[in-house]
């Protein structure tokens, strides 16, 4: 009886492993990388063009490094971010979307991007231009 139970237990555990599948994630491509004062770490996309992200050092923290990211679901969202960024830098008018808000800092040509989780990072016009150029080069 003990042998029968051991054989059944072994058969059941083997069956559960047979149902496992390996899921392949799309390859990530770095479009732009900058470790300068803007605190932007990397601008990436996946190989299927269905996910874009800005990885950045959270500006709230000065003594520790907290890397976060702003996810963008498609190229249209990336272009919207870049267009709104240009507009804020030109007009000083702030914008809010469901994922982030944009505003210009006082006295500087620097854009502040705040996320829903209260994290924030800074971009300037030069970095925004480089990000836009990286989209056209690597597509």
Image (spheres, rainbow, N blue to C red):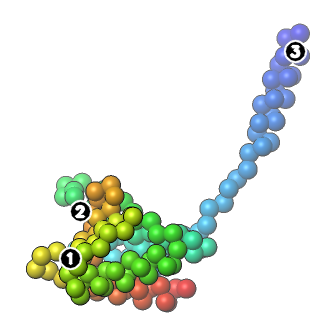
List the residue tagged with mark 3: 3
Q: Nearer the viewer, residue 36 or 129?
A: 129
Instruction: Say above or below: 38 vs 9.
Output: below
Give the residue displayed 85% in from the left and 11% down from the top: 2
Image coordinates for residue 9, horizontal then vertical, percent? 80, 23
Give the residue displayed 52% in from the left and 85% down from the top: 138
Q: Are marks 2 and 3 in contact (CB under 8 Å)?
A: no
Asked whether the viewer can see residue 115, the reply is: yes
Asked whether the viewer can see residue 36, the reply is: no
List the residue tagged with mark 2: 59
First in sequence: mark 2 vs mark 3: 3
Mark 3: few/some/many CA within 10 Å (<14, 14-19, 20+): few
Mark 1: few/some/many CA within 10 Å (<14, 14-19, 20+): many
First in sequence: mark 2 vs mark 1: 2
Give the residue displayed 28% in from the left and 56% down from the top: 118
Element type at mark 3: helix
The reply, left or right, for residue 73 in relation to residue 7 is left
List the residue tagged with mark 1: 104
């Amino acid at each position: 009886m003990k042998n029968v139970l051991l054989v059944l237990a072994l058969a059941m555990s083997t069956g559960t492993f047979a149902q496992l599948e390996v899921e392949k994630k799309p390859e990530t491509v770095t479009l732009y990388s900058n470790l300068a004062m803007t605190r932007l770490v990397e601008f990436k996309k996946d190989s299927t063009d269905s996910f874009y992200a800005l990885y950045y050092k959270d500006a709230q923290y000065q003594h520790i490094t907290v890397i976060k990211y702003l996810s963008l679901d498609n190229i249209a969202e990336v272009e919207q971010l870049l267009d709104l960024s240009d507009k804020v830098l030109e007009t000083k008018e702030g914008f809010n979307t469901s994922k982030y808000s944009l505003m210009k800092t006082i006295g500087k040509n620097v854009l502040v991007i705040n996320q829903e989780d209260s994290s924030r990072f800074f971009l300037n016009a030069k970095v925004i231009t480089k990000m836009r150029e990286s989209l056209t080069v690597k597509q």
